[in-house]
Amino acid sequence: MGNNLFANYGEAVAILLFVIGFGNLLLQSNLIKKIIGLNIMDTAVYLFLAEKGYISGRVAPIVTDGVQSVETYINPVPSGLVLTGIVVSVSVSALMLSLTIRLYQRYHTLDLDEISLRLNKEGL
Amino acid sequence: MAGQMEFVQNFPCFSIMLCMFAGIISSALKGKAAKWINTAVLCANILMSAAVLLFAVDKGGYYVYVMGQFPAPWGNELRVGVLEAGMALFFCVIMLLSLMGGRHKLIQEVKEGKHGLYYILTDLMLSSLLALIYTNDLFTAYVFVEINTISACGLIMIRQNGRTIEAAVRYMIMSLLGSGLFLMGLCMLYDLTGHLLMSNIEGKVREIYLAGTGSSYHIPLLITIAVISVGLAIKSALFPFHAWLPDAYGYSTVSSAAILSSLVSKGYIFLLFKIIYRVIGFEVFHDSKIVNILFIFSLMGMIFGSLSAIKENDVRRMIAFSSIAQIGYIYMGIGMGTQAGMVAAVFHVLSHAATKSLLFIAAIGLTDVSGGSRKLTELTGSGYRNKIAGVAFMVGSLSMVGVPLFSGFISKLLFSQAAVQNEGKMLPTLIVLGISTILNAIYFMKTVIRIYTPVGETEYFGVTWRENKGYAAALVCFMALNVMLGVFSQPIVDLIGVGLDSFSA
């Protein structure tokens, strides 16, 4: 168990970061901190994929010198997944930030709980 | 289903592409043109899905549609069977009717310049729902889950006020937590199995599972199953992850509320069905004990959702809280861990979608003739002022409570039959089903009695169906759909059984 953990320390760090990001997104009441949490969470997934997808000493499967042995290259799919994931997380963060701007312009605060309180008091 | 490809088999791919391109083209057009394109696309999709459904029923089983040139372990695929085609048809019909019923409110509540945007978002929403239904690739499913989330967020906040923006933020936060977990789960699954296509993953998962508890991959597999199930449960608002739901459904424009409650959460649930049968495998999922956790949460949701609905004095939020209870019913079917439970859950997806959108749209007709107030006290006698909305609300309520002739009765019947076959979970299921039905009856019948309580003099004017024909037509279609699900349930239940069998084939 301990050996496995040490050998896969990259993955362990990734999961730890994921949990930190998840907690921030869930528990922070400040919207900007929530978005930072979201980004930590998503980046942790990419770190996890990168750790899993990379084998040290091997290179990306672009054949230049005619070597076609499987031993030379890494699996390119995880890198592809990371790229797609980055695109998704960028658009989601942009949407969250624009919503945050809208809320800030209306209520002059970034505290989501306070906004909810005020909404319950004032109606629309 | 081997042999020569027939033209019909292209339709699932066409319908996804059609919606996407409609969204892209609409972005360059005015609101009116976008509306007509949206309606045309929905009608075309209904026809195409019906053709695919007929084809699938005729041929039986399923077929795989290869996207691009790469064969199975590498390429991307669609997989089409009876259940997928039927669900696509149903979703398109519900979306068309919801838009038709809420159009006059959309014109009132949303700024003129934003109407085109609304139809772009619904086009994108439909394309992502169809892709979730048809895709056979987990990562494609993740990407479309995110597209679905973004367009749902747009549908909530298109009516610009503080409430809806706050609801959209809360919706986004919960959704992102759910999709984060789903993404993590699918990355772990990819690492465990080396595949992204659902059918390829299933074989590997079974191998790992059969290797037993001694295998070093056993615990990671269980964690992965838990992470994926919880992620999708958060996204479909299973209790206790429902906090965002009442505001999002209660304050958005009525078409959005109908689409969100009846289609968006159901899209994720359908994805979960697919994952249970085609990625993890039904036996493995059942043995993993995750079902028991879902079962407990679903029972709690059924009770607490109904209790919150009873306390609520705002009719839209009351219907929204009732959704939490109904999502609980669906997860209870999944949580029973039997084939009969799954059939009941799929049927309840249909029944709840048809009923909840009916209720939202009927409720808006009643509040409109009560000076726009959503308070239950103001609704007194509104059933007389808008007759068609009153009747529709009554039909929806009776269906939710589970009166025979309507769809809700059949789902309750199926749930109880499934419970009787399942010894361990029979007692809690039947007890909670009974309590929940009584609670449903309390708040729905309370509202129905109130809207049919005569009032002498009021300052509110009534409307007749002639003043808004589209609205009346949508309500009549919804009621017909509801009664159809209730009366001709046997062939539908049989089809669901066939579809689920082809899932596990």
Image (cartoon, rainbow, N blue to C red):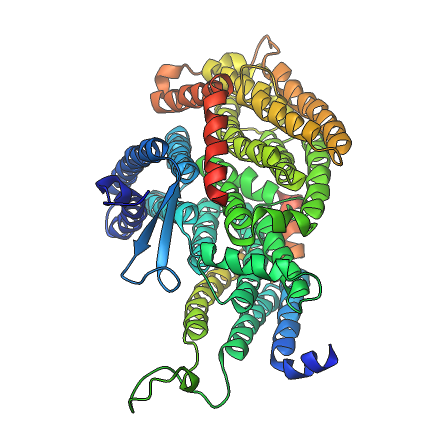
Residue that appears at 63% across and 14% down: B449
- Can see residue A5? yes
Which of the 4 image quarters holds residue B110? Answer: top left
Tell me where residue B400 appears, x and y as whole percent: 59, 24
Which of the 4 image quarters holds residue B313? Answer: top right
Q: Nearer the viewer, residue A68 or A80?
A: A68
Looking at the image, residue A95 lies above or below residue A122: below
Tell me where residue A51 appears, x and y as whole percent: 54, 79
Q: Tell me the quadrant of the picture where the N terminus of chain A can be found.
A: bottom right
Q: Nearer the viewer, residue A105 or A77?
A: A77
Residue that appears at 41% across and 72% down: A80
Residue that appears at 48% across and 16% down: B386
| Lateral position of residue A16 relative to residue B158, left or right | right
Which of the 4 image quarters holds residue B452? Answer: top right
- Can see residue A28? no
Q: Tell me the quadrant of the picture where the C terminus of chain A can be found.
A: top right
Tell me where residue B499 appears, x and y as whole percent: 46, 36
Q: How many marks?
A: 0
| Lateral position of residue A93 relative to residue B245, left or right | left
| Lateral position of residue B150 relative to residue B414, left or right | left
Looking at the image, residue B412 lies above or below residue A42: above
Tell me where residue B170 appears, x and y as whole percent: 58, 52
